[in-house]
């Protein structure tokens, strides 16, 4: 049985200096006040064009980001693969509004697909839909589609075209493509586009994957309906499961606008929903490919048990485990060491462009109960084991 407590395996890719650096960083991230002040100061300094890139790159960027471009990620890609862990290159640019910039993001995603082609080190590619369209356009398509102007409709269809170009490239290269989830109030148009791409490109293999944020209480039913739709349409269903990324924002918006929260009321309900979705995917493994993206140990153990129960081999390409670079190495490295398919999300991009991502990681580690403490405990255990 895999043990997530084996720190020798968990941190074998890290030097003594790496471990000490990670320990200091997670200690700082455990302090909510420091995180808030740091986020404000960093964003202000970047807006004022102050020379803080070096400081950021030597601290939080070093822990969670692969580099400024694909080439700079090579050392991370190779290091992970040395320990049987794949890389998902994640171009972490957000919030662009100009058509040229949106096209540039599309082209960067195409570059990651080209880099992944025939490359066992990079088993998936990924993109965030709002990286290729203005948020307001998807929001209007979701909430007020009949009031869209001709220009807005044209802008939306350019988004669909960008997605199609990227999905076609993934299909032609044979590289599975993960399409990330967005906030609930803009997710339906995204789901519709992803369904259309799956119907087009998943006839013979699992190429396009949708993402379900399982803290949403409607997603288990959505998974089942998506499965029926795929069976009726004679295509394969690719699913990435995550717990979710916008919990506070979702609850605050629901309260402010007076509609029921789309989020489960507590962690236990979320965990149950996540685990039921995993079970449904494995029970229907001939129709559904699963990438389980979580740092939750119990869900990982549950998936291992499900695979064994349903005679799914450890290296079956229809099942992958995934964690973020710089987090939960005790899960990733121990699973990979035991022969399971494991991959890490490796964000990349210039410091200014990945700051929103980095701030979310810092806030997530501060907000998620026990996350920072768990990382610190494991690092301390390994530092003690090494006697450094």
Image (cartoon, rainbow, N blue to C red):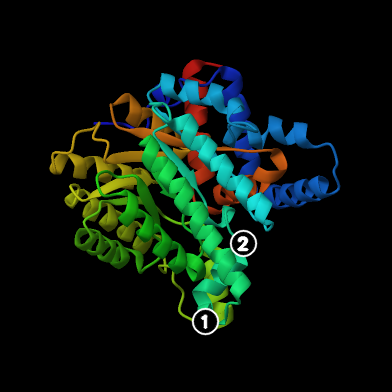
Residue at image location 42% in from the left, 69% down from the top: 265
Q: Which residue occupies 58% across, 77% down?
A: 148
Element type where label 2 sits in the image: loop
| Residue 19, visible in the rendered structure | yes
x and y percentages locating residue 310 in the rendered image: 14, 43
- Residue 224 position by quadrant: bottom left
Q: Secondary structure at mark 1?
A: helix
Q: Which residue is mark 2?
A: 134
Residue 237 in the image: state x and y as whole percent.
28, 53
Q: Nearer the viewer, residue 175 or 378?
A: 175
**If the image is split into quadrants, where does the N terminus sit?**
top left
Q: Position of residue 116 (x, y in %)?
A: 45, 31
Residue name at image x 24 percent, y 52 percent: 281
* Disc nearer the start of the sequence (2/1): 2
Image side of residue 253 versus residue 51, left or right: left
Position of residue 150 in the picture relative to residue 273 (left or right): right
- x, y percent for residue 261: 46, 74
Left or right: 285 as drawn, with respect to 121: left
Badge 2 local density, few (<14 within 10 Å), some, or many (20+)? Answer: many
């Amino acid at each position: 049985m895999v043990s997530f407590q084996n720190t020798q395996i968990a941190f074998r890719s890290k030097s003594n200096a790496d471990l000490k650096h990670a320990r200091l960083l997670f200690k700082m991230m455990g302090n909510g006040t420091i995180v808030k002040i740091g986020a404000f100061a960093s964003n202000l300094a970047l807006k004022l064009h102050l020379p803080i890139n070096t400081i950021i790159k030597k601290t939080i960027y070093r822990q969670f980001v692969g580099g400024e471009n694909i080439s700079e990620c090579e050392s991370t890609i190779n290091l992970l693969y040395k320990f049987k862990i794949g890389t998902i290159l994640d171009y972490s640019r957000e919030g662009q509004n100009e058509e040229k910039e949106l096209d540039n993001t599309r082209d960067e995603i195409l570059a990651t697909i080209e880099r992944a082609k025939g490359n066992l080190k990079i088993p998936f590619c990924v993109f965030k839909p709002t990286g290729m369209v203005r948020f307001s356009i998807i929001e209007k398509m979701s909430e007020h589609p009949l009031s869209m102007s001709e220009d807005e409709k044209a802008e939306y269809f350019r988004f669909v075209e960008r997605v199609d170009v990227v999905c076609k490239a993934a299909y032609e290269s044979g590289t599975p493509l993960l399409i990330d989830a967005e906030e609930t109030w803009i997710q339906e148009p995204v789901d519709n586009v992803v369904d259309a791409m799956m119907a087009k490109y998943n006839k013979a293999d699992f190429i396009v994957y949708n993402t379900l944020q399982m803290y949403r209480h409607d997603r288990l039913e959505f998974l089942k309906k998506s499965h029926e739709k795929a069976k009726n349409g004679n295509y394969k269903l690719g699913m990435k499961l995550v717990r979710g990324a916008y919990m506070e924002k979702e609850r605050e918006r629901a309260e402010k606008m007076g509609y029921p929260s789309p989020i489960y009321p507590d962690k236990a309900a979320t965990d149950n929903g996540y685990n039921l979705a995993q079970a449904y995917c494995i029970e229907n493994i001939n129709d559904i490919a699963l990438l389980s993206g979580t740092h939750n140990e119990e869900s990982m153990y549950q998936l291992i048990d499900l695979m064994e129960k349903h005679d799914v081999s450890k290296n079956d390409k229809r099942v992958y485990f995934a964690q973020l670079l710089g987090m939960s190495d005790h899960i990733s490295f121990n699973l990979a060491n035991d022969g399971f398919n494991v991959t890490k999300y490796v964000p990349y991009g210039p410091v200014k462009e990945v700051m929103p991502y980095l701030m979310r990681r810092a806030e997530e580690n501060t907000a998620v109960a026990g996350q920072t403490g768990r990382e610190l405990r494991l690092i301390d255990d390994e530092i003690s084991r090494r006697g450094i």
